[in-house]
Image (tube, rainbow, N blue to C red):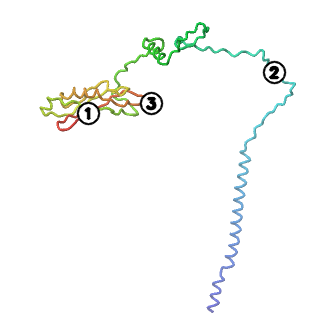
Amino acid sequence: MTNQVSAIKLTYGYLELREYYYKAAKRAVTFAVSAHLLAISSYFISQFLFQEDEPVYTVRIMKYSDLGPPPSIENAEAAPRVNIAEPSAKPTVGIPIPVPDADINPEATIATQEELAAVSNDAVAEGVGSGEIIIEDEGPPADFVPVEKNPVPVKQVSPAYPEIARRAGVEGTVWVKIWVDKEGKAKKAQVIKSDAELFNQPSIDAAMKWIFTPAIMNNGPVAVWVSIPFKFKLNQGR
């Protein structure tokens, strides 16, 4: 009796599940094939609808007899002449001039480079033509000048310690503002802060002897102000 019950439990629903499996498999295959066909057909339809028309080229075939005669070489217009401005003053030194052999002086020589340079320098010194050089003073720079490279001291001079301040035991610091020109030289010095007036003039005298590398902006030197502290201590240097 027990074996019959077990056999009934094992065989119950087998036929129904197998039938449902075949139906589900057929539906899945049908759906997959339909989806692929739909995707492929959509691609080709979109390519057909949005394809661009090929450009149409027009070709005109002509006979040699239909061509006109070539242009005449004799009637060709000459190219316009370009006027070149000549120098206002031609150099008079070192230009060879052809002369008869009988007039040649055997002692005559061509001017050297030194002689040519001397003549050019004399003309510049006299302010002849465009060789005149005028150096204008641009005045002091603004308090703040934007730079790409700050000036760097290459020569520093320590101020002299005043004897009166040394005897009195006075110490202090003086802040000096230095006008550094485009060549890196100190052009002017001003005291902006001082602990004692005795140290002002020695600080200015020392600041005027400082030399810097020029400040750089836009690949060129510029003038700027630089602040330098000068410290006066009895037992130490500046």
* Image quadrant assignment for residue 175: top left
Q: Against 131, is 42 above or below?
A: below
> From the viewer's perspective, is 166 left or right of 151?
left
How far apart are the alpha carbons under marks 3 and 1? 29 Å
The location of residue 146, given as percent across then percent down, is 38, 31
Element class at badge 2: loop
Amino acid type at image mark 3: Asn
Q: Alpha-carbon neighbours of circle 3 within 10 Å: few (<14), some, or many (≥20)?
A: few
Amino acid type at image mark 2: Pro
Element class at badge 1: strand
Q: Alpha-carbon neighbours of circle 1 within 10 Å: few (<14), some, or many (≥20)?
A: some
Q: Which mark is residue 70?
A: 2
Where does label 3 land, which residue? 219
**Residue placed farthest to the bottom in the image?**
1
Task: Check if mark 3's residue and mark 1's residue have beta carbons within 8 Å.
Answer: no
**Residue placed farthest to the left in the image?**
168
Is 212 or 11 nearer to us in this picture? 212
Where does label 1 land, which residue? 229
